[in-house]
Amino acid sequence: MKDANNRKPGVPLPRKGKNLTIKKNINLASAEEASRVYNKVKDRLADINNWDQWSGKGSGIFTLTDPEGTKKNNLPAIGDYIKIKIPAPKSANSDGFDWVKIDKIDSKNVKDTDERYIIQVHPSQNPLNKNNEVSHFLDSDATSTFIVSRKGKQVAAEIYGRNELPNVEKAQGVFNKLRNIVVGLFATAGLARIQWEKLAAGLLEFDNN
């Protein structure tokens, strides 16, 4: 369901730059089976350290950390970070990683037949550094919203990239500016879509479905 502004609930409005929408779904034999599968998919989405497992070869490597930058092996929380190792030139200010911060987690049963789980992140500074420079190839206004949901017998995985522009104005140093332009342009031109298409499909892939 969308609101009066034609916006998916929980997803920022597209205002600038590139925007990405990915939707995958599977249909199950019954609502009960769909609910069981939804819970498995929800657990997979929350298991950020294993996102590369669901995405397959060539994926970025994702590591969940606490607000101090220490790796976490439990559930994500608002204020945690994700450090990302992508197959691209490394940033000069973040030990080779791009960083995002989790600013929204929402889990709810809309009604008996509807369930939904959301994780939303935005590009952020490296929590291990003292400066406030955004350590990501996209500007800090960009967001990525990951949603898994169930509606009746259908389970869906959706990923929304919004307001994606290369991080140039706030980047420090010529190398980082050039790196962010190149990586950001490649990402918005289609490489990010490949990554997220594979993740969304992998979240829903079960041998017994």
Image (spheres, grey):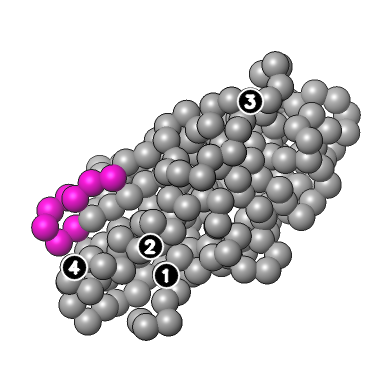
Residue denoted by label 1: 204
State how far apart marks 4 and 1 are (Cα).
16 Å
Q: Is residue 193 left or right of residue 203?
A: right
Label disc, if present, on residue 127 of the rendered structure: 3
Q: Secondary structure at mark 1?
A: loop
Let me know if residue 16 appears in the view: no
Residue type for callout 4? Gly
Residue range corresponding to the magenta coloring: 107-114
Query: Which circle's residue, 4 or 1, is located before the other in the chain?
Result: 4
Query: Which circle's residue, 3 or 2, is located before the other in the chain?
Result: 2
> In which quadrant is the C terminus drawn?
bottom left
**Does residue 117 belong to the magenta stretch?**
no
Number of marks: 4
**Residue neighbourhood size for the residue with mark 3, other residues' Cα within 10 Å, grouped as few (<14), some (14–19), many (≥20):** many
> What residue occupies the far left of the structure in this picture?
112
State how far apart marks 2 and 1 are (Cα).
6 Å
State how far apart marks 4 and 3 are (Cα).
41 Å
**Residue neighbourhood size for the residue with mark 4, other residues' Cα within 10 Å, grouped as few (<14), some (14–19), many (≥20):** some
Residue denoted by label 2: 41
Q: Residue at x 26, y 78 (%)?
A: 28
Q: Secondary structure at mark 3?
A: loop
**Do the CB atoms of the residues marked 2 and 1 lie less than 8 Å apart?**
yes
**Do the CB atoms of the residues marked 1 and 3 lie less than 8 Å apart?**
no
Residue type for callout 2? Val
Residue denoted by label 4: 152
Query: Which circle's residue, 1 or 3, is located before the other in the chain?
Result: 3
**Rendered location of residue 179, percent (x, y):** 82, 40
Q: Residue at x 79, y 51 (%)?
A: 88
**Rendered location of residue 67, percent (x, y):** 54, 27
171 versus 14 height, above or below: above
Residue type for callout 1? Leu
